[in-house]
Image: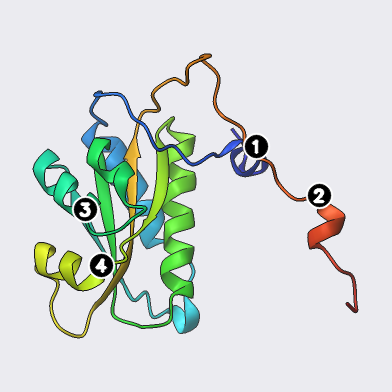
């Protein structure tokens, strides 16, 4: 799969099979994330990997939209030493695209109850946690096909030279 195909076909996967993701693939995904670009090369991230089902379920209760973590093969809490979220977003994109290349689905989740999540995971003071990623092999939809989401047309989101 080339990068354009990965970007074009990547979908948020919110429901997973019970199949474990091999450790080697998890490490490849994490390595891709650590290679993400960051402002002034600060690399403000720490990836907290969660594979314990009970821990994933508890973290899934830390936000209205964090449910996919409960059924994931593994999750990654995106911990940052910086309040600026752009760098953590870059790392999240790299993690997800690497996973997709390996046939592993993912979903970005917002931890709306970030203090509860920080306490649950033992995140030290001065670190920030608002997002996590759920990973696993996609469960099939009712018709056996991936659910496709629409995207706005190109000309609706792109402007040239001036608004």
Do the CB atoms of the residues marked 1 and 4 lie less than 8 Å apart? no
Residue position for label 4: 113
Disc 2 residue crowd, few under 14, some 14–19, many 20+, Cα 10 Å = few
Query: Is 3 or 112 nearer to us in this picture?
Result: 112
Residue 18 drawn at (x, y percent): 24, 24
Q: Which mark is residue 153?
A: 2
Look at the picture and state if 146 lies above or below 25: above
Residue position for label 1: 5
Disc 1 residue crowd, few under 14, some 14–19, many 20+, Cα 10 Å = few
Image side of residue 123 versus residue 27, left or right: left
Closer mark to the observer between disc 3 and disc 1: 3
Alpha-carbon distance for marks 2 and 3? Answer: 35 Å
Residue position for label 3: 61
Do the CB atoms of the residues marked 2 and 1 lie less than 8 Å apart? no
Could one spot residue 19 in this view of the protein? yes
Query: Is 75 or 62 nearer to us in this picture?
Result: 62
Residue under the image location 47 percent in, 54 percent down: 94
In which quadrant of the rendered view does residue 120 lie?
A: bottom left
């Amino acid at each position: 799969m080339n990068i354009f195909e990965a970007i074009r076909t990547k979908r948020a996967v919110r429901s997973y099979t019970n199949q474990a993701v091999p450790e080697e693939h998890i490490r490849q995904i994490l390595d891709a994330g650590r290679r993400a670009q960051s402002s002034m090369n600060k690399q403000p991230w720490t990836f907290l990997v969660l594979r314990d089902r009970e821990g994933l379920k508890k973290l899934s209760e830390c936000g209205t939209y964090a449910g996919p973590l409960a059924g994931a093969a593994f999750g990654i809490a995106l911990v940052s030493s910086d309040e600026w979220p752009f760098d953590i977003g870059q790392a999240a994109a790299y993690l997800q695209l690497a996973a997709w290349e390996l046939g592993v689905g993912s979903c970005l989740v917002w931890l709306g109850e970030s203090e509860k999540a920080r306490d649950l995971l033992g995140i030290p003071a001065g670190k920030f946690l608002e997002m996590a990623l759920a990973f696993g092999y996609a469960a099939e939809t009712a018709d056996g096909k991936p659910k496709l989401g629409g995207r706005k047309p190109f000309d609706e989101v792109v402007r040239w030279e001036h608004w």
